[in-house]
Image (cartoon, helix red, strand yellow):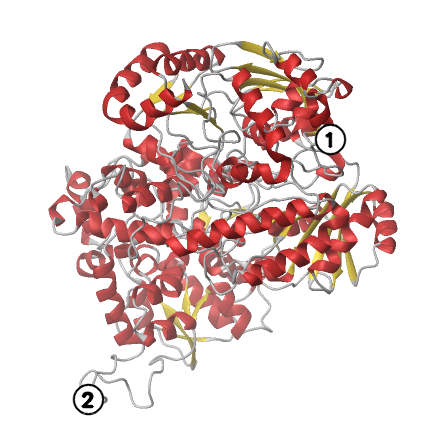
């Protein structure tokens, strides 16, 4: 029957069964049934190296819906794979049949009992939502993988997830009380202890095989995740069917509800960071710390800390050890025999260091030289006492194969994560990947370890299970699978009768040139899918947070671009409507550029796709691409006359902008006109950039900046001609136009580019390249500063003038700190609220701004996220709802929570405009305006 099932799916389903199957599911299921190209593309991959294209996706509303979907798929002989957050690293969250998306509707916290310390959850509930609900009661769910902000409880059960606190609180299996499960055959089971929920014949099968089950599993491993946990069914272990199902990777049943154990939060969590000479020394020391009862023992070496080891104790590797109480930490530090140590009790300081560890799964995907590194041997585990010896042998094996990787992980449990620079694009590289996997599997087994210590086996390791368990025990896995799922309909090819580990890779067919290779760097860790209250000051991904739809996340867009490059599901290349629709709600906030651990830059990809999508048919472009995209020219040519023009009937429609927003008014006198009429006896120390927004729409901001800069003793000059950073053209997906504008700007700022024959026409000024205007270039508008610092050199990589100008750019706060270090800013003395501009966060950095606010007595932190206006985005028809939702995510709650006398700070013109539209009772100001007002109150004009 299984062979027939596989044959019908692979050979016949795409051509014949799909429309009929989809119709049958829509008739039977109250939830969402989506067999579209977009849905299939979004679920073809998880966070692994693998790709399996499904027929369609079903998002059931409740357990009855799950049962109905399974019944239809059973009738048509189509396999089913349950999917949570899609962060599985071994390929088990992908499937060729129907994907059950359990995150859309089955995401409730059913109940929480503080006295019993239990919670009942649906499988699509994100872990952090459970932890937030439990925290007021002094409780938490113990397992906490680094993907806690987006992984689901159902996915954690399927993979038996662990996390950094497993040395204290164990794996997910250690924290599950009971499971409601539906089998592919339609049985509803309640799994628990004493054999509760076991299918017919399971108890007898276990009874006939007690000897191999008692002797076939390695000892001393808390992180033994590989294979089925059949030893949990032994009578002396309580015949715990719920525990056994944890880690079964959706191959035996679909969890529809789970009862979980909660644990008390530590009363006084303290982070102790221990420095060691190298990784081996840290690994050797980890096991010796366990008798002291730590909550975590995490390890990483210096080659993972790409930004340098500032703030960490001396050493080449570190153990992050969390304990409950400062005295316990001090005692453990004395016993640790570390090179150096650092004790951190401050929660903010702890979060900053933990963020390095949590981002490691993405950071490790790039080698220090910028090359690609992949999962594939991601998370084996050995007994903690063997970890040092294993890592030394593992490093030698990497060297033998000519590979590089950066191990890190849960050293207290002997569990190691590593991304390796496999060549997964070529036949030779894939062959080396297979040979290395086989060799390292033998190494793990030789050290008494488990092939998987956290993320499960999936396609990556299931083929190697006989090396760990032997043929007899692996044969029992198959027998158990057949009892639970005789039709083989649940996640076939995983764990039992697995597909080859080097089949179904997502890389080999990608074109050598184009976006495909770039978007492949998205490994699916899904930090862009963070929902609910933001964890930290990040930005990514505002459109996903507004819609909750995968296609509007950075990962979702990357998956669609990946499939576009492959050309199998999305067959019309850069004319793909699916990709265009997904990118349409990308605000180009650049948050992914900094917040994505893998460095995906969706704003840049959107520009390139948009240019190709409209290539050869400019009449198809939205009008806003010409009007808002060409805003600098319109303002330069027409100026205040645009105010009257926009009051004409149908003006908004003709301009391609939404009539629901009032257009900003153009100032009667531009900033450059005002500046040209004033006199100053100061020698210029800097060039103030007259960006389009400041020049025509907010000249008062420019005047305020001049007032503050001159108070700091700095003479100000403007460029000797009209300049533009090209931002609006980039935002409208018109990079060719942006390049022309940028080259003209470089001609003004630096001099004409040298001609091919040396000096003469087109030659640079005498003396070689050098700014034609004095000092650093100070840019008041963060988006323009970011465009000059990043887009300019990226769009003109062969023009040395671009890098020169980019290096000269300073933000307002950076200029004051660098050029007037002894200047004392005026005392504002008021709390501050508002939002850090998304480009400021993603490209420029805001450390100087925070220091300036502190010196001026502006107390409080600014919100993260994106305001939602984002230049032309919020003015374009169809974006109104998402734009408002983005503002409501973080900005508007911050404004409402601030006291009435708080100063509202927003350096971006878009941010100030969004605040004016959505919170008209609050008046937002640029930092320069706030300081200028304070100067006016305390110091006379000079």
Q: Choose top left, top right, bottom left or bottom right for residue 810.
A: bottom left
Q: Where is residue 553 in the image (x, y as percent from the top left)?
A: 41, 39
Q: Do residues under tags 2 and 1 come within 8 Å of each other at their CB atoms?
A: no
Tell me if mark 2 has few (under 14), some (14-19) or many (20+) residues whose alpha carbon lies within 10 angstroms of its own: few
Q: Which of marks 2 and 1 is nearer the N terminus?
A: 1
Residue 504: tell me if it is visible: yes
Q: Is residue 271 visible?
A: no
Label 1 secondary element:
helix
Could you say where residue 350 lies in the image, as x and y percent from the top left?
69, 49
Q: Is residue 906 above or below residue 915?
A: below
- Which residue is under mark 2? 760
Q: Which residue is drawn at 23% across and 38% down?
A: 577
The 10 Å Cα crowd at callout 1, few under 14, some 14 to 19, many 20 or more, is few
Task: Depth check: give the residue in front, 545 or 463.
Answer: 463
Q: Quadrant of the N terminus?
A: top left
Q: Please indicate whether residue 639 sits to the left or right of residue 395 in the image.
A: left
Q: Nearer the viewer, residue 29 or 892?
A: 29
Label 2 element class: loop
Residue 753's tag is: none
User: Quick check: 280 left or right of 456?
Assistant: right
Residue 857, how many percent across, how many down? Answer: 62, 56
Establish if 383 lies above or below 789.
Answer: above
Percent of width and height locating residue 689? 36, 67
**Residue 215 has which mark?**
1
From the viewer's side, name the closer residue of 870 and 734. Answer: 734
Q: Which residue is drawn at 54% across and 54% down?
A: 364
């Amino acid at each position: 029957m299984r062979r027939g099932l596989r044959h019908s799916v692979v050979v016949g389903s795409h051509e014949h069964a799909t429309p009929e199957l989809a119709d049958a599911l829509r008739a039977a299921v109250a939830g969402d049934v989506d067999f579209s190209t977009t849905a299939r593309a979004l679920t073809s991959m998880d966070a692994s190296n693998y790709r399996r294209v499904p027929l369609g996706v079903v998002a059931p509303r409740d357990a009855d819906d799950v049962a109905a979907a399974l019944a239809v798929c059973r009738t048509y002989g189509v396999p089913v794979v349950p999917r949570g957050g899609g962060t599985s690293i071994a390929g088990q969250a992908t499937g060729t049949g129907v994907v059950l998306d359990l995150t859309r509707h089955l995401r409730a916290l059913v109940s929480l009992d503080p006295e019993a310390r239990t919670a009942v959850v649906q499988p699509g509930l994100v872990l952090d939502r459970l932890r937030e609900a439990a925290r007021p009661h002094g409780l938490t769910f113990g397992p906490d993988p680094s993907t806690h902000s987006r992984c689901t409880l159902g996915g954690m059960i399927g993979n038996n997830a662990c996390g950094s606190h497993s040395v204290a609180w164990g794996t997910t299996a250690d924290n599950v009380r009971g499971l409601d499960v539906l089998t592919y055959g339609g049985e509803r089971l309640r799994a628990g202890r004493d054999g509760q929920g076991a299918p017919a014949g399971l108890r007898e099968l276990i009874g006939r095989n007690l000897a191999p089950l008692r002797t076939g599993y390695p000892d001393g491993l808390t992180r033994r995740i590989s294979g089925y946990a059949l030893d949990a069914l032994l009578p002396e272990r309580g015949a715990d069917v719920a525990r056994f199902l944890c880690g079964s990777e959706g191959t035996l049943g679909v969890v529809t509800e789970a009862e979980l154990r909660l644990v008390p939060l530590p009363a006084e969590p303290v982070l102790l960071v221990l420095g060691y000479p190298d990784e081996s020394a840290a690994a050797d020391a980890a096991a010796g710390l366990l008798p002291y009862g730590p909550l975590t023992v995490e390890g990483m070496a210096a080659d993972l800390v790409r930004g340098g080891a500032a703030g960490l104790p001396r050493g080449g590797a570190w153990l992050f050890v969390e304990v409950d109480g400062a005295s316990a930490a001090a005692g453990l530090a004395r016993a640790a025999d570390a090179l150096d140590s650092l004790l951190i009790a401050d929660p903010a300081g702890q979060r900053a260091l933990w963020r390095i560890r949590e981002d490691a799964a993405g950071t490790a995907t790039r080698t220090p030289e910028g090359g690609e590194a992949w999962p594939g041997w991601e998370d084996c585990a050995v007994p903690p006492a063997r970890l040092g010896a294993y890592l030394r042998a593992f490093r030698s094996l990497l060297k033998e194969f000519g590979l590089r990787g950066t191990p890190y992980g849960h050293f207290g449990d002997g569990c190691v994560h590593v991304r390796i620079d496999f060549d997964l694009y070529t036949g030779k590289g894939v062959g080396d990947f297979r040979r290395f996997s086989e060799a390292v599997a033998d190494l793990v087994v030789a050290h008494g370890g488990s092939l998987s210590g956290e993320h499960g086996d999936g396609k990556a390791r299931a083929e190697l299970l006989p090396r760990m368990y032997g043929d007899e025990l692996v044969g029992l896995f198959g027998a158990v699978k057949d009892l639970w799922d005789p039709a083989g309909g649940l996640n076939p090819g995983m764990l039992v009768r697995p597909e080859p580990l080097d089949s179904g890779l997502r890389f080999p067919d990608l074109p050598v040139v184009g976006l495909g290779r770039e978007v492949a760097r998205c490994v699916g860790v899904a930090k862009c899918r963070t929902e609910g209250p933001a964890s930290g000051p990040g930005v990514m991904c505002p459109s996903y947070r507004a819609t909750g739809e995968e296609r509007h996340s950075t990962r979702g867009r990357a998956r669609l671009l990946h499939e576009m490059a492959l050309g199998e599901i999305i067959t019309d290349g850069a004319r793909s409507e699916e990709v265009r629709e997904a990118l349409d709600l990308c605000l180009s906030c650049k948050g992914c550029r900094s917040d994505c651990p893998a460095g995906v830059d969706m704003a840049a990809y959107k520009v390139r796709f948009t240019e190709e999508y409209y290539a050869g048919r400019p009449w198809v472009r939205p009008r806003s691409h010409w009007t808002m995209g060409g805003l600098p020219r319109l303002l330069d040519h027409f100026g205040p006359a645009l105010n009257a023009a926009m009051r004409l009937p149908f003006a908004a429609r003709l301009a391609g902008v939404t009539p629901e927003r009032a257009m900003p008014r153009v100032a009667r006198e531009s900033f450059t006109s005002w500046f040209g009429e004033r006199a100053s006896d100061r020698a210029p120390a800097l060039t103030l950039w007259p960006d389009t927004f400041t020049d025509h729409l907010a000249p008062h901001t420019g005047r305020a900046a001049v007032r503050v800069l001159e108070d700091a003793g700095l003479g100000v000059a403007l460029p000797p001609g009209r300049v533009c950073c090209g931002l609006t053209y980039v935002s409208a997906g018109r990079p060719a136009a942006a390049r022309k504008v940028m080259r003209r700007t470089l001609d003004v700022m630096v001099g004409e580019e040298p001609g091919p024959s040396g000096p003469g026409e087109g030659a640079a000024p005498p003396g070689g390249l050098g700014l034609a205007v004095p000092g650093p270039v100070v840019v008041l508008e963060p988006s323009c500063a970011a465009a000059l610092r990043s887009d300019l050199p990226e769009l003109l990589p062969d023009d040395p003038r671009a890098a020169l100008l980019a290096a000269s750019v300073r933000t307002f706060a950076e200029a004051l700190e660098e050029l007037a270090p002894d200047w004392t800013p005026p005392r504002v003395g008021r709390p501050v609220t508002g939002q850090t501009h998304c480009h400021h966060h993603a490209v420029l950095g805001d450390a100087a701004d925070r220091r300036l606010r502190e010196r001026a007595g502006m107390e409080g932190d600014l919100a993260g996220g994106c305001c939602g206006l984002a230049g032309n985005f919020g003015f374009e028809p169809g974006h109104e709802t998402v734009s408002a939702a983005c503002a409501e995510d973080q900005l508007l709650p911050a404004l409402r929570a601030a006291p009435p006398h708080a100063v509202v700070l927003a350096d971006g013109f878009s941010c100030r405009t969004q605040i004016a539209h959505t919170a008209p009772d609050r008046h937002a100001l640029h930092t320069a305006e706030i300081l200028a007002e304070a100067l006016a109150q305390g110091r006379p004009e000079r």
